[in-house]
Image (spheres, rainbow, N blue to C red):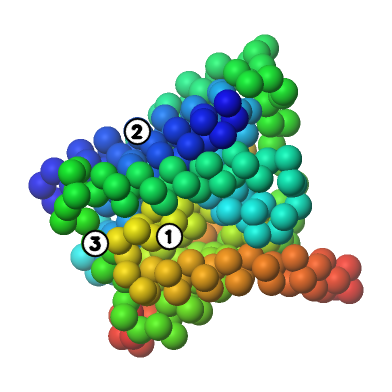
């Protein structure tokens, strides 16, 4: 496993610092699905600018800095577009119904010992693990 | 200033996702793949991200956000059908593709056409969520 856990830990710390900055400066929980979902729902016009700014940094900075800090980084996303579309739909629907994803329920929820955050995280990890077991090892399609 | 801080936070989030390897779907699926060649990286990423937030939540006590206003209310405690069903649906999609909402956005600039299609599908799912959530509530009331 060489140094991958070190880059994982270092990247994780940056993610946590981003979440801490969003909380302490703007008073908001850094949840990727909530921030994007709020734009999609157009429910809270007062926060549209800050949501767009967040998404701009989130999309723009990795794109701009990848050649410098991680030129080898690839997504290795499956070329099977049916799986890509079904997975995208499920992630979009699921995170909005559950009101959070890996960043909101996971990082921000667990760190404040939120029962809902912990329970959500347990369920999406279990579902993800079973999905990989079924579709990779039993069916061999991913 | 809210937008400046938000851009800064989003940038840190995105760079962290890139450096940590979490925009690589094989590493995420590798972590979920307990019956295969298990990859522990995601646990280090999650642990590393939780550490600054443990401190940050302590700092919210008896203070206000830098830009004013209020910190988020204490977390709700009730576990409802939406939380469980939504998390399971999310987990299935996460396992199928190896992308969750943060990395789906962070990798948009280098994820190719597939990444764009995933994001469009995810946004379509977000559009559909309120209706499906309401349907879920009706089922809960009927049961």
The crowd level at tag 3 (other Cα within 10 Å; few <14, some 14-19, many 20+) is some
Contact between marks 3 and 1 (CB within 8 A): the answer is no
Of mark 3 and mark 2, the one earlier in the sequence is 2
Residue A111 in view (yes/no) = no
- Residue placed under numbered mark 1 in the picture: B104
Observer-nearest of B143 and B25: B25
Residue A6 lies left or right of residue A47; in this view the side is: left
Chain under callout 3: A
Is the same chain shared between marks 1 and 2? no
Which of the 4 image quadrants contains residue A74? bottom left
- Residue placed under numbered mark 2 in the picture: A13
- SS for tag 1? helix
Residue A57 lies left or right of residue B34; in this view the side is: right
Chain under callout 2: A
Q: Which mark is residue A83?
A: none
Q: Considering only vertical position in the picture, is B91 above or below A105? A: below
- SS for tag 2? helix
Residue B131 in view (yes/no) = yes
Observer-nearest of B143 and B69: B69
Which of the 4 image quadrants contains residue A84? bottom left
Q: Quadrant of the C terminus of chain A?
A: bottom left
- SS for tag 3? loop
Count of marks, rendered view: 3
Chain under callout 1: B
Q: Residue at x 27, y 51 (%)?
A: B21
Q: Which mark is residue A74?
A: 3
Is the same chain shared between marks 3 and 2? yes
Q: Residue at x 34, y 59 (%)?
A: B109
Q: In front: mark 1 or mark 2? A: 1
Q: Residue at x 73, y 40 (%)?
A: A46
């Amino acid at each position: 496993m060489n140094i991958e856990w070190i880059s994982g830990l270092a990247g994780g710390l940056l993610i946590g610092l981003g979440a801490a900055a969003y909380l302490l400066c703007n008073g908001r929980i850094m949840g990727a699905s909530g921030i994007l979902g709020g734009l999609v729902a157009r429910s809270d016009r007062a926060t549209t600018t800050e949501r767009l700014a967040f998404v701009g940094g989130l999309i723009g900075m990795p794109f701009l800095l990848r050649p410098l800090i991680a030129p080898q980084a690839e997504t290795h996303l499956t070329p099977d577009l049916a799986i890509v579309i079904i997975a995208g739909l499920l992630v979009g629907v699921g995170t909005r119904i559950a009101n959070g994803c890996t960043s909101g329920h996971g990082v921000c929820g667990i760190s404040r010992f939120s029962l809902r955050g912990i329970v959500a995280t347990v369920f999406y990890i279990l579902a993800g693990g079973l999905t990989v077991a079924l579709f990779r090892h039993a069916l061999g399609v991913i | 200033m809210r937008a400046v801080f938000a851009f800064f936070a989003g940038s840190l989030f995105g760079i962290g996702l890139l450096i940590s390897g979490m925009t690589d779907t094989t590493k995420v699926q590798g972590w979920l793949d307990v019956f295969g060649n298990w990859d522990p990286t995601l646990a280090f990423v999650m642990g590393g991200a939780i550490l600054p937030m443990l401190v940050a939540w302590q700092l919210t006590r008896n203070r206000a956000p830098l830009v004013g206003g209020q910190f988020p209310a204490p977390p709700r405690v009730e576990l409802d059908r939406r939380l469980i069903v939504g998390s399971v649906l999310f987990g299935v999609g996460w396992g199928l593709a190896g992308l969750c909402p943060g990395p789906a956005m962070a990798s948009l600039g280098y994820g190719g056409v597939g990444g764009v299609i995933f994001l469009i599908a995810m946004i379509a799912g977000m559009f559909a969520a309120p209706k499906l959530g309401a349907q879920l509530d009706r089922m809960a009331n009927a049961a």
